[in-house]
Image (cartoon, rainbow, N blue to C red):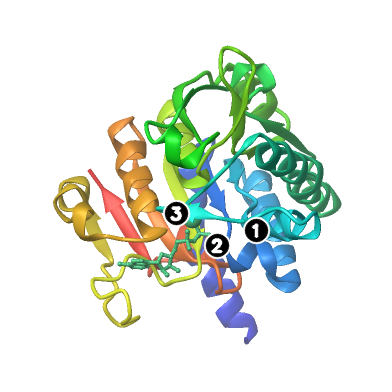
Amino acid sequence: MTGTANVETLLEALPYIRQFHGRTVVIKYGGAAMREEGLRDEFATDVVLLKYVGLNPVIVHGGGPDITRYMERLGLEVRFVEGMRVSDEETVEIAKMVLLGKVNADIVARLNRHGQPAVGLSGEDGALFGIAPHPKTDEVGFVGEIEQVDVEVLNHIAADYIPVIASAGVDREGRSYNVNADTAAGRVAAALAAHKAIFLTDVRGWLAEPADEGSLRSRVTVKEIDTALDSVAGGMRPKLEACAAAIRGGAGSAHIIDGRRPHALLLELFTDAGIGTMVTP
Ligand code: ADP
Ligand code: MG
C-alpha cells in the first residue's frame, strides 16, 4: 500500500470510529479464526484495537474441535443430534474443563499479550446465565437453554477489561450444561442491547444455496429470517436464530462474516463496503 492509500483507509475509518465510540459489540468467536494460529493473532489484534478506539467488545465462544479432541483422547464417544453435542455427565465435565481451562484461558492470554487485559468467565460467574435443560433433553442430555441473562457482571468487567464468555453454565440445582455458543452470543447481545452482534464463521455468510458461495444474502431482515428458517440446516440455523434474537432484544444489527478472511472484524466495522450477511430489524 502507498502512503496515500494508508491515509485514505484511515479517513474512511474515522466516521465509524466516531459513531462506534462507547458502543458495545458482541463477537461470537469460532471457526477458522479460532483454529488457525495466524488468524488467532489477527483476531486478538483486531479486538484489542476495538478497545483502544473506545468500543466495548464482548467475546462469546464455544469450544467444538478442542472438546472433541480431548474426548477422543479419553476414549469417549462423540455424537451430535441436530448440531447439538450429545452430552452425558462425563461429557459435560470434560467439555467444561476444556472450554474454561483451555479454550477460554488461551483467548484471555492472547488478548492480554496483545495489549488489552481480558477477563474470562462462563455462565456461572456472577450468575450470568440462568440455564434450563433443552426440551430434547432425552436425546441430547446436558445441553442447556438460556432462560435469562444477568449482564450486571459484564458491565462491571467491561468497564476496564474485555469480557471473554465461555458458553456453559449451571441450572438451579447446580448441574452443568453445554450451551450453543451462537445462541449464547445472541442472548448476550440482546441483554446488552448491543450496537452490533458479529458472528465469525467459515462461510461468506448466509448463502441462499448452501453449496454456492456466490449466493450470499448480503442484507436481510428479521422477518426474512423467520420466513426462511425452516429450510435452513446445519450450523447456520442457530446462527440465524441468534441474529434474530439479538435484534428482537434491541441490538442494532447482526452480522455473519467470514472469519477465514484476515482482519474480517475490522473490514466489517471500519470500511464502507462491509462484508458478509447484515441482519437489520
Ligand atoms: P461455527 O463454528 O461458525 O458455528 P457451524 O459449522 O456451526 O460454524 O455453522 C456454519 C456452517 O453452516 C457452514 O460452514 C455451512 O457448512 C453450514 N450451512 C448450512 N446451511 C447454510 C447456508 N444456507 N448458508 C451458509 N452456511 C450454511
Ligand atoms: Mg456452530
Q: Amino acid at mark 1?
A: Asp
Quadrant in which the C terminus is drawn:
top left
Identify the residue shown where x is 50% and y is 43%. 180
- Residue 186 visible at all: no
| Figure quadrant of residue 232 | bottom left
Identify the residue shown where x is 50% and y is 63%. 201
- Residue 73 visible at all: yes
Q: What is the C-alpha distance between the residues marked 2 and 1? A: 6 Å
| Mark 1 neighbour density, 10 Å: few (under 14) some (14–19) many (20 or more) | many
For the residue pair 227 and 115, the one nearer the viewer reads as 227
For the residue pair 158 and 1, the one nearer the viewer reads as 158
Instruction: Check residue 83 in the rendering and tell me which mark sits there, or answer none.
Output: 3
Queried on whether the Cβ of the residue with tag 3 lies below 8 angstroms from ligand 1, the answer reads yes
Which residue of the protein is positioned furthest toward the top in this rendering? Answer: 172
Q: Secondary structure at mark 2?
A: helix
Can you give x and y, in whole percent of width and height, for residue 197 in the image?
44, 45
Instruction: Check residue 46 in the rendering and tell me which mark sits there, or answer none.
Output: 1
Q: Is residue 189 above or below residue 3?
A: above
Q: Secondary structure at mark 3?
A: loop
| Mark 3 neighbour density, 10 Å: few (under 14) some (14–19) many (20 or more) | some
Q: Secondary structure at mark 1?
A: helix
Q: Amino acid at mark 3?
A: Gly
Quadrant in which the N terminus is drawn:
bottom right
Give whichever of discs 3 and 1 has the lower sequence position.
1
| Figure quadrant of residue 54 | top right
Give whichever of discs 2 and 1 has the lower sequence position.
1
Q: Amino acid at mark 2?
A: Leu
Q: Are marks 2 and 1 in contact (CB under 8 Å)?
A: yes
Queried on whether the Cβ of the residue with tag 1 lies below 8 angstroms from ligand 1, the answer reads no
Q: For mark 2, what is the residue?
A: 266
